Amino acid sequence: MPLKFDLTATTLSSTDVTQLQAMRTRCARRILLSTSLAASGHPGGSLSSLDMLLVAYSILNHNPLHPRMAERDRLVASIGHISPGMYSVLAEYGYFNETDFLSGFRRTGSGFPGHVESIVPGVEWDTGNLGQGLSAAVGMAQSFKLKKSSNRVFCLMGDGEQQKGQITEAIRHAVKYKLDNLTVLIDRNKLQICGNTEEVMPQCMQKLYGGLGFNTVKLEDGHDYNALYQAMRSAYQNISGIPTVIIARTIMGKGISFMENKAKYHGSPLPPDDLAKALAELGVENDFPQWQERRKQPVSTHTIMSPRTHYPQVQAGQPVVYAADKLTDCRSAYGTALLGLAQANNKAGEPPLIVGISCDLEGSVKMDDFHKQSPQGYLELGIQEHHAAATAGAMSCEGLVTFFSTFGSFAVSEVYNQNRLNDFNHANVKIVATHVGLDVGEDGPTHQCIDYLGLLKNCFRFSVFMPCDPNQTDRIVRYVATHAGNHFVGMGRSKTPVITKEDGSVFYDANYVFTPGKADWLRQGSDATLITYGALTPACLAAWQLLQQESGKSVGVLNMASLIPLDKEAILAAAKIGPIVTVEDHHIETGLGASVATVLLDHGLAPKMKRLGVHQYGGSGKPSDLYKLQGLDAESIARTMLALLG
Amino acid sequence: MPLKFDLTATTLSSTDVTQLQAMRTRCARRILLSTSLAASGHPGGSLSSLDMLLVAYSILNHNPLHPRMAERDRLVASIGHISPGMYSVLAEYGYFNETDFLSGFRRTGSGFPGHVESIVPGVEWDTGNLGQGLSAAVGMAQSFKLKKSSNRVFCLMGDGEQQKGQITEAIRHAVKYKLDNLTVLIDRNKLQICGNTEEVMPQCMQKLYGGLGFNTVKLEDGHDYNALYQAMRSAYQNISGIPTVIIARTIMGKGISFMENKAKYHGSPLPPDDLAKALAELGVENDFPQWQERRKQPVSTHTIMSPRTHYPQVQAGQPVVYAADKLTDCRSAYGTALLGLAQANNKAGEPPLIVGISCDLEGSVKMDDFHKQSPQGYLELGIQEHHAAATAGAMSCEGLVTFFSTFGSFAVSEVYNQNRLNDFNHANVKIVATHVGLDVGEDGPTHQCIDYLGLLKNCFRFSVFMPCDPNQTDRIVRYVATHAGNHFVGMGRSKTPVITKEDGSVFYDANYVFTPGKADWLRQGSDATLITYGALTPACLAAWQLLQQESGKSVGVLNMASLIPLDKEAILAAAKIGPIVTVEDHHIETGLGASVATVLLDHGLAPKMKRLGVHQYGGSGKPSDLYKLQGLDAESIARTMLALLG
């Protein structure tokens, strides 16, 4: 039976301490062996945070037989590199046996990667880039508060990573929303890769956390089991409305005389000779050669956890159909759809299912109606996009349908890596960016997000959807709410007409169902095809008309609202018809045009083709002027197509 | 003559105050008029920070006739949206006349964009994304310290943007490096877009700055000219080794009764009726209609400043040639080249010309020899990549050849937007990332940067160079040091062989000169071509050998070290030869293969082609295993090529 403390006791018994000491020795052995076997990895910090981990897992409610049971507490290791420590402790608590860990650590295809990943039973969040774990932990703690569930969250952090600015953002969130179910554990070994933390970059954690409103607890000895127990027990039972940080002074390489307080052991395993000495100090057998032999066998994969698959049942609500003569912006349609989703799913006085997060742009991103309808489901996270994106990812894995809305430049360009980390974590975040492209106009290049597709193409699991009008917006928003996965939905700022069929009736009418990977022929054509999406769809339809009326050309218009996944068949069909012009309010080298080019090449096709897009940073001015300047107005599009048609 | 205070005076004279009041009225008029004319923009914060700006420009050493004179002090407006305030004040100080501003503000092609840009005389740094300006200001202040020049730097910030985590990073840098030539001015109007700053996201600036080591000054009335003068004068003369922040309580919309303390005026201009009332309150004529008429004329462009062009003379030093049998890693070659550059350009006891910045990875990125040679030129910025990237950009514009080195995931993925902002600013930063691709191996997906090209393709002014061996690394590093512009140089972590010619002699020998946009035929072939770069070049050469020896195929190998700009002619030449296989340690959809596809399509070519690259997140394991798993080993490459050859 793994160790589990009786939290009514205010101190540990001597039996408890003895048991922890024995566990420490076994875990220290595994830390040393695993890193020496892999000839890489991070033993130093693993040894300094080991005692904190051992005590934490004896306090938290968890079950190695049911590593994803809903009522479990969470421990997020923000220092993903202390994987040897985490895996050693998880083995100790029965999540897997040490053979799997020691024979697989850092081997291709094994279940024990170099930085902690949630394929390992007991690991809650993939980390590796420092300074990110607290945002995930805050997201989990926030989710439990919203769901009125009593789970607690511990976040183990290093002291070096406290330098990352994102941490300040996460701290503010935790204080504002009174996340007393959150405890931050800082492994204060005073060493980072390049030496003493105070020499590398002076900081004062107590003033930082305390000044921003945390309850701070300082432990002079982070290896003293009783001190750790008392501080963590108190934090675990904290209902003060104030989150806690425990800053525990520890020793890098603790327990091995020649490793203690040496920065080099941050990322250097012991060579075999030193390993032998270290194991002798621990008083354990040196079975390194046997394990080396064992590691020649193929890796075992049976411990690997599959990604979380739970996604809640969500009511899509009643689609809103905008009439052909309605002039509105897609972001208002988003706001209306979000309100509809809230009405269908969030009950007054009950925990919200639909959650909205914004960063000081509630009105601009049209979350205000949602906020009024579901005050309990709306989080205002301030101008803190890095944290907001990361925490939204964590919340989206806790059964909350999490919408994160801000301008495109802040939702993707500024926080690309936070989205990437959410992608690693198989999150379900719904990023709805309301101001993308040159359509943002007068606010100029910093605010004109022309790279959302170019950036998110680098994430293997993100979808990218760009509705072309309010009707399609409504349906896409309802789609992403009701489907698992990381979804990006982007739109411009301006009012835009409802797209209609040739007969003037609404194209995306009540019968329309959005399907990822399916493009729509807004107009059929026998001579050539315009492929477009989003804000420039009306310009393409105007070009279609010009081409028809003034030049007698029959040009199809294909709306590629689903940019990832892409409708390859539609592209191939277009290539069979004739020349192709791609038209987008996006960087010309990284958007749809580039995607279409790779699809065509992959199929050995080279139709006459011209890519139209943003070919220099946009200026500050009216969107229509900016489009014209970059050859993206209806006349330029028509002219380009005519030139191709010859 | 613009106002200039005699700083020997401890207080302002009543004449000074009267003059400031008159200036305020004229500037307030311009703020209101410009935003109403553009029907967009940010009058509220412009009015709250106006008095700070007026006093600041009367203290700073600057000259409207020589807006880029070397000895000028700097004012960075981190709140780029207060452009109406900045332009009004700069007009007041004689940088341009108000007609240019009022007739051009926020019009396409004019010299007066919606967020401040350095095309405007007197504007030092393009901003718009909040929380970035302090990093730029710190970079400038740091540059002056390194150059032992006495210029001072003021940074005007908002209070809402203090929520951004990056600010904490910038604060720590300023404290660590004793930047007492830096003064932060915070416009504490207590309002952000969504309301009261304390409700949106509680913060305590005094505790934050003070706790991290700044000298903090709080002004109860940020519109009191004498209080502003005294605080700024004192900060301007500060030589304590401690930077200063002045937190000045102000009033959003100050001076217009019905605008004061209203959050909506953050980003809402006055409609004509309200404008008339406001101008009446100021006691000035309402000439709105005349200006409206004036704005129907084409925009004037004569005020537009061209980008900074000064780039220092740098000695490239003696190239290092690695012998054919030398096995080393490219990062060591980088370290040696950087040392050589320092030896050739940095003189002991003198200000450094070559500057190196790292983030707690000095040894891994091989900056240690440089650090020893040029201690005065090395900056250790801790685990604070967002700030480091941004501040490196600013330093690179101050005549310092600035190398910023860390792992690829931290140098690009994590800080893409900071690079983008440097790109707007025509910076000259040299990012050398030492750990990119699956080659990073055991550290796993968070550390495997497979998106550097996919990301930087979105920046219009960045070059991307990927050397394939230590010799090419040496020459590329010397190239980027001696040439203006933002350059990214990437390399793997592992040791890699010296690339040789067929006869076994060194390919990139003493005669080699790196030329952007020029690819190298490592092997000529008459049947087909492998196009590659960087870490997979040796695998392609091994595949070349396999194809020749085992299948009798003559396959060329083209090394595309210059990924931006691309050697289009070489690609077209390859297409004429036969099938093409692109091979890269990069995301398959966003790397070289995608670039090659667009080039071919643009030229109507569709040779048989196969793109090889990273098609799923990498695991944790030996690079050779990871490559094999993704079909990137020599055998897989050869097999793919054979299949294409049929």
Image (cartoon, coloured by chain):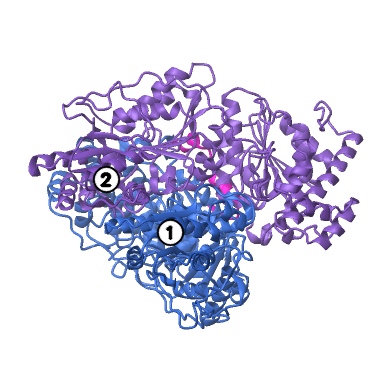
Chain colours: A purple, B blue
* Residue A448 against residue B196 in the figure, above or below: below
Frontmost residue, B643 versus A167? B643
Residue A553 pos. (x, y %): 13, 42
Residue A243 pos. (x, y %): 65, 35
Task: Give the residue type that dot 2 points to.
Answer: Ala
Q: Which of the image's four quarters has the C terminus of chain B?
A: bottom left
User: Relative to A552, is A11 on the left or the right?
Assistant: right
Residue A264 pos. (x, y %): 72, 61
Q: Could you say which quadrant of the image residue A237 lies in?
A: top right
Disc 2 from disc 1: Cα separation = 23 Å
- Would residue A141 be visible to someone looking at this image? yes
Q: Could you say which quadrant of the image residue A358 lies in?
A: top left
Mark 2 Cα shell of 10 Å, populated few (<14), some (14-19), many (≥20): some
Residue range corresponding to the magenta coloring: B196-217
Where disc 2 sits, the SS reads helix
Frontmost residue, A324 versus B267? A324
Where disc 1 sits, the SS reads strand
Q: Which residue is drawn at the image coordinates 19% and 47% (left, top)?
A: A637
Q: Which residue is drawn at the image coordinates 21% and 39% (left, top)?
A: A556
Q: Is residue B215 magenta?
A: yes
Q: Which of the image's four quarters has the N terminus of chain B?
A: bottom left
Please give the label number shown on residue B581: 1
Please give the label number shown on residue A575: 2
Report in which chain the residue with disc 2 lies: A
